[in-house]
Amino acid sequence: MILEVQKIEKTLAKKQVLHGVSFTVEKGEIYWFLGPNGAGKTTTMKSILGLISPESGEIKIFDESGLTMESKKRIGFMPENTYLYKHLTGREFLEFNGSFFGLKWEELKNTVDSLLEKVGLENAGDKYLKSYSKWMLQRVWLAQSIINKPELLFLDEPMSGLDPIGRKMVKDLLVELRDAGTTIFFNTHILADVESICDRISIINKWHLIVEWQEVKKLKWGLEDFFIEKVTEHNEHLQK
């Protein structure tokens, strides 16, 4: 397994927001961590990435507990909310981030050119980020997350703010990355956008994992109906 999460629990502001969450992600798959808004998706991802610390449980990445400097070099991350240097151009921003991975200048330049084209910003690379629209910022941040050719890629709501063309671009890119060997773990509550490309899903609801390791292709009915049924069942169970 490339990622193992075992019984993690987290409390924020005296409220428990993760209850024994456990799941595994296999190498070379697109894994969808699904749930309603506020269910605990981003908290789980931040715990995995070491941005917050769970009170209990264990997280293994590349068969190692926690994140090491070496494992960080093998990971890409796109947060839900983009915090960018608005006085850099898109090209400069990507070059700046790529420099952390020790890429030589010529390789870095070629990589940035390729990524700008891949995310549809080849004509905007020399414009300042402060002039970018929300969908353009989403795209340049996505490019940043794969500049190091990560083995494991984390995406938090990657479809947010994108139009249908942008969402199609992201889906095609995710499939391309998976086929090239990248493992992808992402959060979203938008079902229709990515049902066709995911290998497996987990569902979290009200800070509890209610479905683990479900293969999408083995669902007997549509994912939307499956999702609504499971969330409704869990809500009813909590009310008893």
Image (cartoon, rainbow, N blue to C red):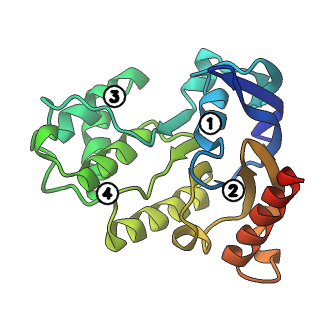
Q: CA distance from mark 4 to mark 2?
A: 21 Å
In what element is the residue under mark 1?
Answer: helix
Above or below 170: residue 187: above
Q: Name the residue carrying label 2.
A: 29
| Amino acid, disc 4 | Val
Q: Earlier in the sequence, mark 2 or mark 1?
A: 2
**Image-based side of 121 in relation to 140, left or right:** left
| Amino acid, disc 2 | Glu
Q: Are marks 1 and 3 in contact (CB under 8 Å)?
A: no
Q: Quadrant of residue 10?
A: top right
In what element is the residue under mark 2?
Answer: loop
Q: Quadrant of residue 121?
A: bottom left
> Which residue lies at the image location 42% right of the left edge and 25% below the top edge?
101
Q: Name the residue carrying label 3.
A: 97
**Residue 231, image x, y percentages:** 75, 62
Q: Quadrant of the N terminus?
A: top right
Image mark for residue 45: 1
Q: Are marks 2 and 1 in contact (CB under 8 Å)?
A: no
**Residue 16, image x, y percentages:** 73, 28
**Residue 23, image x, y percentages:** 82, 44
Q: Could you say which is closer to the camera, residue 236 or residue 39?
A: 236
User: Is residue 104 visible in this depiction of the protein?
Assistant: no
Above or below 25: residue 5: above
Q: Earlier in the sequence, mark 2 or mark 3?
A: 2
Above or below 223: residue 25: above
**Residue 76, image x, y percentages:** 51, 37
| Amino acid, disc 3 | Asn
Image mark for residue 119: 4
In what element is the residue under mark 4?
Answer: loop
**Image-based side of 104 in relation to 152, left or right:** left
In what element is the residue under mark 3?
Answer: helix
